Image (cartoon, rainbow, N blue to C red):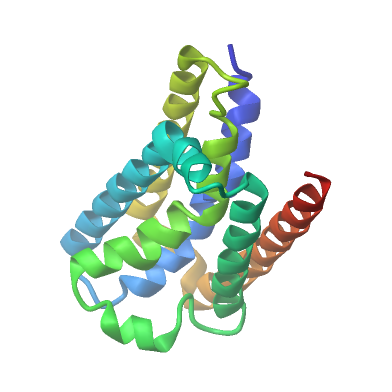
Amino acid sequence: MIDILATFILFFAVIDPIGTVPVFMKVTSQFDERAKRRIAVKAVLVAGGILLFFVVAGEVILDAMAIPLSAFQIAGGIVLFLFALSMVFGESKPEQEVKMAVSISETAIFPLAVPSVAGPGAMLAAVLMTENVRFGIMEQAQTAVVICSVLLLALLLMLGATWIQRFIGNSGASIVSRVMGLILASVATENILVGIKEYFLL
Protein backbone atom coordinates (compact mmCIF):
# COMPACT_ATOMS: atom_id res chain seq x y z
CA MET A 1 0.00 0.00 0.00
CA ILE A 2 1.49 3.33 -1.05
CA ASP A 3 1.13 6.57 0.88
CA ILE A 4 -1.71 8.05 -1.18
CA LEU A 5 -1.41 11.59 0.19
CA ALA A 6 2.37 11.79 -0.23
CA THR A 7 2.15 10.37 -3.76
CA PHE A 8 -0.63 12.83 -4.66
CA ILE A 9 1.44 15.76 -3.37
CA LEU A 10 4.47 14.55 -5.35
CA PHE A 11 2.57 14.32 -8.64
CA PHE A 12 0.70 17.56 -7.95
CA ALA A 13 4.09 19.26 -7.64
CA VAL A 14 5.63 17.76 -10.78
CA ILE A 15 2.53 18.00 -12.99
CA ASP A 16 1.70 21.42 -11.53
CA PRO A 17 -1.97 21.85 -12.57
CA ILE A 18 -1.97 25.46 -11.33
CA GLY A 19 1.10 26.35 -13.37
CA THR A 20 -0.53 24.89 -16.47
CA VAL A 21 -3.33 27.47 -16.37
CA PRO A 22 -1.30 30.51 -17.54
CA VAL A 23 0.30 28.39 -20.26
CA PHE A 24 -3.15 27.22 -21.36
CA MET A 25 -4.53 30.78 -21.40
CA LYS A 26 -1.60 32.03 -23.45
CA VAL A 27 -1.58 29.38 -26.17
CA THR A 28 -5.39 29.21 -26.53
CA SER A 29 -6.03 32.95 -26.62
CA GLN A 30 -6.90 32.83 -30.36
CA PHE A 31 -9.48 30.02 -29.98
CA ASP A 32 -13.15 30.15 -29.04
CA GLU A 33 -14.55 28.52 -25.88
CA ARG A 34 -15.54 25.28 -27.61
CA ALA A 35 -12.08 24.87 -29.11
CA LYS A 36 -10.49 25.61 -25.75
CA ARG A 37 -12.47 22.81 -24.14
CA ARG A 38 -11.41 20.39 -26.90
CA ILE A 39 -7.77 21.42 -26.46
CA ALA A 40 -7.93 20.95 -22.68
CA VAL A 41 -9.49 17.47 -22.95
CA LYS A 42 -7.09 16.32 -25.67
CA ALA A 43 -4.06 17.68 -23.81
CA VAL A 44 -4.99 15.79 -20.64
CA LEU A 45 -5.72 12.56 -22.56
CA VAL A 46 -2.38 12.73 -24.37
CA ALA A 47 -0.51 13.59 -21.17
CA GLY A 48 -2.28 10.76 -19.35
CA GLY A 49 -1.34 8.30 -22.07
CA ILE A 50 2.30 9.38 -21.91
CA LEU A 51 2.54 9.17 -18.11
CA LEU A 52 0.77 5.80 -17.95
CA PHE A 53 3.13 4.55 -20.67
CA PHE A 54 6.06 5.52 -18.44
CA VAL A 55 4.39 3.76 -15.51
CA VAL A 56 4.16 0.53 -17.51
CA ALA A 57 7.23 0.62 -19.73
CA GLY A 58 9.47 3.52 -18.71
CA GLU A 59 11.86 1.51 -16.56
CA VAL A 60 11.96 -1.33 -19.09
CA ILE A 61 12.90 1.02 -21.93
CA LEU A 62 15.60 2.78 -19.90
CA ASP A 63 17.05 -0.57 -18.81
CA ALA A 64 16.97 -1.92 -22.36
CA MET A 65 18.90 1.12 -23.57
CA ALA A 66 21.26 0.95 -20.58
CA ILE A 67 20.27 4.49 -19.56
CA PRO A 68 20.48 5.09 -15.80
CA LEU A 69 17.60 6.94 -14.16
CA SER A 70 20.04 9.66 -13.12
CA ALA A 71 20.89 10.41 -16.77
CA PHE A 72 17.19 10.61 -17.61
CA GLN A 73 16.73 12.97 -14.67
CA ILE A 74 19.55 15.26 -15.85
CA ALA A 75 18.22 15.39 -19.42
CA GLY A 76 14.68 16.00 -18.20
CA GLY A 77 15.88 18.77 -15.91
CA ILE A 78 17.66 20.55 -18.76
CA VAL A 79 14.56 20.44 -20.99
CA LEU A 80 12.37 21.63 -18.12
CA PHE A 81 14.81 24.46 -17.35
CA LEU A 82 14.77 25.72 -20.95
CA PHE A 83 10.98 25.72 -20.95
CA ALA A 84 10.95 27.56 -17.61
CA LEU A 85 13.26 30.26 -19.00
CA SER A 86 10.86 30.92 -21.88
CA MET A 87 8.09 31.49 -19.31
CA VAL A 88 10.21 33.82 -17.16
CA PHE A 89 11.46 36.00 -20.00
CA GLY A 90 8.21 36.55 -21.82
CA GLU A 91 6.39 33.88 -23.80
CA SER A 92 5.27 30.62 -22.31
CA LYS A 93 7.04 29.05 -25.29
CA PRO A 94 9.22 30.36 -28.15
CA GLU A 95 7.47 32.75 -30.55
CA GLN A 96 8.31 30.55 -33.53
CA GLU A 97 6.41 27.67 -31.95
CA VAL A 98 3.47 29.95 -31.13
CA LYS A 99 3.16 30.67 -34.83
CA MET A 100 3.48 26.99 -35.70
CA ALA A 101 0.85 25.79 -33.24
CA VAL A 102 -2.13 27.01 -35.22
CA SER A 103 -4.31 23.92 -35.03
CA ILE A 104 -6.18 22.48 -32.07
CA SER A 105 -4.18 19.24 -32.19
CA GLU A 106 -0.79 20.98 -32.30
CA THR A 107 -1.69 23.28 -29.43
CA ALA A 108 -3.06 20.43 -27.33
CA ILE A 109 0.06 18.33 -27.79
CA PHE A 110 2.69 21.07 -27.54
CA PRO A 111 3.18 22.80 -25.17
CA LEU A 112 0.17 21.66 -23.11
CA ALA A 113 0.39 17.85 -23.06
CA VAL A 114 4.20 18.00 -23.30
CA PRO A 115 5.99 19.55 -21.48
CA SER A 116 3.45 21.54 -19.43
CA VAL A 117 1.39 18.63 -18.04
CA ALA A 118 3.49 15.54 -18.81
CA GLY A 119 6.83 17.22 -18.29
CA PRO A 120 10.20 15.59 -17.66
CA GLY A 121 9.66 15.77 -13.91
CA ALA A 122 6.30 13.98 -14.16
CA MET A 123 7.74 11.31 -16.47
CA LEU A 124 10.64 10.75 -14.10
CA ALA A 125 8.33 10.56 -11.08
CA ALA A 126 6.14 8.01 -12.92
CA VAL A 127 9.21 5.82 -13.45
CA LEU A 128 10.64 6.24 -9.94
CA MET A 129 7.32 5.64 -8.16
CA THR A 130 6.70 2.40 -10.06
CA GLU A 131 10.15 0.75 -9.93
CA ASN A 132 9.64 -2.98 -10.22
CA VAL A 133 12.12 -3.78 -7.43
CA ARG A 134 10.29 -1.53 -4.95
CA PHE A 135 6.62 -1.66 -5.90
CA GLY A 136 4.24 -4.49 -6.75
CA ILE A 137 1.49 -4.49 -9.36
CA MET A 138 -1.14 -3.30 -6.87
CA GLU A 139 1.02 -0.39 -5.71
CA GLN A 140 1.80 0.57 -9.32
CA ALA A 141 -1.94 0.54 -10.06
CA GLN A 142 -2.56 2.81 -7.07
CA THR A 143 0.09 5.22 -8.36
CA ALA A 144 -1.61 5.22 -11.78
CA VAL A 145 -4.93 6.16 -10.12
CA VAL A 146 -3.24 9.02 -8.26
CA ILE A 147 -1.75 10.29 -11.53
CA CYS A 148 -5.19 10.23 -13.15
CA SER A 149 -6.69 12.17 -10.23
CA VAL A 150 -4.07 14.93 -10.60
CA LEU A 151 -4.69 15.02 -14.35
CA LEU A 152 -8.42 15.39 -13.70
CA LEU A 153 -7.68 18.35 -11.46
CA ALA A 154 -5.51 19.87 -14.21
CA LEU A 155 -8.40 19.43 -16.67
CA LEU A 156 -10.87 21.15 -14.34
CA LEU A 157 -8.51 24.09 -13.89
CA MET A 158 -7.99 24.45 -17.64
CA LEU A 159 -11.75 24.30 -18.25
CA GLY A 160 -12.14 27.09 -15.72
CA ALA A 161 -9.24 29.11 -17.15
CA THR A 162 -11.52 31.72 -18.74
CA TRP A 163 -13.12 32.52 -15.40
CA ILE A 164 -9.70 32.55 -13.72
CA GLN A 165 -8.37 34.93 -16.39
CA ARG A 166 -11.33 37.28 -15.89
CA PHE A 167 -10.65 37.25 -12.17
CA ILE A 168 -6.89 37.93 -12.28
CA GLY A 169 -6.71 39.73 -15.66
CA ASN A 170 -3.99 39.58 -18.30
CA SER A 171 -1.46 41.27 -16.02
CA GLY A 172 -2.17 38.78 -13.26
CA ALA A 173 -1.83 35.88 -15.69
CA SER A 174 1.50 37.27 -16.88
CA ILE A 175 2.75 37.57 -13.31
CA VAL A 176 1.62 34.05 -12.45
CA SER A 177 3.32 32.71 -15.58
CA ARG A 178 6.64 34.31 -14.67
CA VAL A 179 6.49 33.25 -11.02
CA MET A 180 5.63 29.68 -11.99
CA GLY A 181 8.43 29.77 -14.55
CA LEU A 182 10.89 30.72 -11.82
CA ILE A 183 9.62 27.94 -9.56
CA LEU A 184 9.81 25.53 -12.48
CA ALA A 185 13.41 26.59 -13.12
CA SER A 186 14.22 25.84 -9.47
CA VAL A 187 12.64 22.39 -9.73
CA ALA A 188 14.58 21.75 -12.95
CA THR A 189 17.86 22.80 -11.32
CA GLU A 190 17.16 20.48 -8.40
CA ASN A 191 16.53 17.60 -10.82
CA ILE A 192 19.81 18.27 -12.60
CA LEU A 193 21.84 18.50 -9.37
CA VAL A 194 20.28 15.37 -7.87
CA GLY A 195 20.79 13.50 -11.15
CA ILE A 196 24.47 14.49 -11.29
CA LYS A 197 24.96 13.46 -7.66
CA GLU A 198 23.29 10.07 -8.15
CA TYR A 199 25.13 9.45 -11.42
CA PHE A 200 28.55 9.82 -9.81
CA LEU A 201 27.51 7.73 -6.81
CA LEU A 202 26.69 4.77 -9.06
Q: What is the total number of numbered labels drawn onto the structure image?
A: 0
Picture residue at 55% right of the left edge, 47% below the top = 66
Residue 172 falls in which quadrant of the image?
A: bottom right
Q: Is residue 180 visible?
A: yes
Vertical relation: 32 (above or below) 135: below
Q: Is residue 44 left or right of residue 54?
A: left
Front-most of 164 and 87? 87
Location of residue 2 with respect to 155 vertically, above or below:
above
Q: Residue at x 47, y 42 (%)?
A: 64
Q: Is residue 34 left or right of residue 164?
A: left
Q: Nearer the viewer, residue 16 or 122?
A: 122
* Residue 70 as seen in the image, left or right of residue 32: right
* Relative image position of residue 61 (x, y in whole percent): 44, 42
For image coordinates 20% across by 64% down, the residue present is 105
Between residues 83 and 87, which one lies in front from this camera angle?
A: 83
Q: Is residue 155 above or below residue 187?
A: above
The C terminus appears in which quarter of the rendering?
A: top right
Q: Give residue 9's quadrant in the image.
A: top right
User: Is 12 in front, or is 201?
Assistant: 201
Give the x, y percent position of residue 59.
50, 37
Residue 137 x/y as whole percent: 46, 15
Q: Would residue 166 be visible to someone looking at this image?
A: no
The quarter of the rendered structure image containing the N terminus is top right
- Residue 174: x and y, percent? 54, 76
Q: Which of the 4 image quarters holds residue 82?
A: bottom right
